[in-house]
Image (spheres, rainbow, N blue to C red):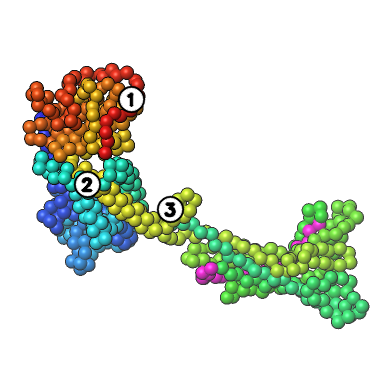
Amino acid sequence: MNAAARAASISALAALVLAAVWFFWPTGLGGGTTFVSTHGISMEPGFSTGDLAILRPAGSYAVGDVVAYYDESLETIVMHRIVSGDADGFVTQGDNNDWLDKARPADDEILGRLFLRIPQGGKALHALRSPGILVLVAGAAIAVAGVVRTPRGRHTVRSARRRRSASFSMPTRARARQVALGSGAVAILAAVGGGVVLALPASQTDTRTLQVIQQGEFSYAGEAVPGTTYPSGVIATGDTVWTRLARDLTVSFTNTVTGPGLTDLVGAMRLDVVISAADGWSAVVGSGPVVALQDGTATASVAIDPAGAMELLSRHFAEIGATGGAATLTVTPVARTSGTVLGRAFTAGSPVGLDFTLDAASLKVGGDPATVLAPSTPWPVEIDEVVPRSLTVLAVSVPIELARIAALGVLAIALVVLAAAAWIGRSSRGDVADQFLIRHADRIVPVASFTPGPTVIDVSDAESLHHVAERFDTLVLHHAGEDEDVFAVRDVDATYRFVVPGSPDRQRGKPPVPAPAGVPDPADMTAPLPVIIPAPPALQVPLRVSSGLRGRFA
């Protein structure tokens, strides 16, 4: 990109930034944009607490526009929708309200019409204004600014050369730059993730299933002919009822309704007696009186005539031509209960009944008495409730507040690590030599001096020298002088060299101009004047590994 194109791009970017700043400049600082952080439920479901509304003034306002105005009675900015207008001003109302606002803002009292809504943007803006975040951002900005500042001028370069002994080693600086890149990526991910969790509402609506339990208890009692079978003449719960001896048998059922947050509980219940044959025939042989539910409990009773039930069963068998058989006598609670559970209305039906096995001689409780005499009937009730939002991460539920703290914590740590790694891996001199040292620290060996081969080839740039080292699979020797840095790759009979001078009469990063005949060149590292052969565009070098570095090292 040439200078004219670069200047045009910078100008366009600056104009775009200035236009955005002008458009979003807040009203409190002389601009025309109003920022409103919403709270309350008056504009639900379109707006939730913590959303950020951006409003801009308009030439005119109409019914349906969401506008903001300052309500003097409430001493706050109100953002509601225009529903009508009259001579006194506009009539506004919250989308979730069933009443109109008392204030009647005029056209010139309206701060603006809704331009953009940012979900949970108000909370994010509030978080960014917190002292801790401001200190963190300011510290990171100062650290990064100090790191990216490049020293200018030859005097600075020479001063940096004199201070190079206090710098970190090149491998350490190279690793620090890799850590800085990784930390920067983590910081970006943490910032994006933090923005997402900040934008999410802090609460969510969950459906929870609660159980309303109808706990029942059956009992029966009656009189019987005293004798060997019933010495006391009393039939108690759990006894076998011998129909020839039984008198005045009564079954009772107590129903107790329980559940979390039960209110407005009403209901009624009665007991029906039903006889059923094995062939599918059934008939109601009696019903008890209806009783009301009081304080969640009702007790109903019904009289049972086993002999009458058996006679009815015999008539059925006689009609169908069967020889007879056993049957089931069931005492069935018929109930209907209603109420509310944590504000959610529910209706419960009838509990489970009690079965007796009926034959010509007896009436017995069917099944285990401990179970059938105390049935428990659950009724599920689903309720919607607002609970703190949680996120599922690797099958683990994480509260959103914890996720926000974790995202901001990771962002803070990543920024601190980024600043520290960037400072360690900084280019203290800012020249080609220092950048080459950091980029290829694993291949560079510092030397005090060495003797080059008979032929010295000056390459055009540092990366070309690195390519030569890769071709020969050898190391790059580095000699740091007071006024220049010399990098060299030794082959059997040639030395490839790149010099980064620092003297005023040379351009940094360019090969040195050969010295006049008879005058030694400092870049030759004490060697006789070499033959300078320009490096061709595509250097063709035999692929052979140097047998060794000749010379003396310190």
Say which label, 3 or 1, has the lower sequence index.
Answer: 3
Mark 2 vs mark 3: in front: 2
The x and y percentages for residue 392 are 45, 51
Residue 38 is drawn in which quadrant?
Answer: bottom left
Three-letter amino acid code of the residue under disc 1: Ser
Residue 391, disc: 3
Three-letter amino acid code of the residue under disc 2: Ser
Q: Of helix, strand and loop, which mostly describes the magenta segment?
A: strand
Residue on which the image places disc 1: 546
Residue on which the image places disc 2: 165
Quadrant of image for the N terminus: top left
Q: At 13% from the left edge and 47% from the top edge, which residue is drawn? A: 22
Give the structural element (helix, strand or loop) at label 3: strand
Say which label, 2 or 1, has the lower sequence index.
Answer: 2
The x and y percentages for residue 115 are 22, 48
The x and y percentages for residue 402 are 39, 58
Residue 120 is drawn in which quadrant?
Answer: bottom left
- Magenta range is 260-277
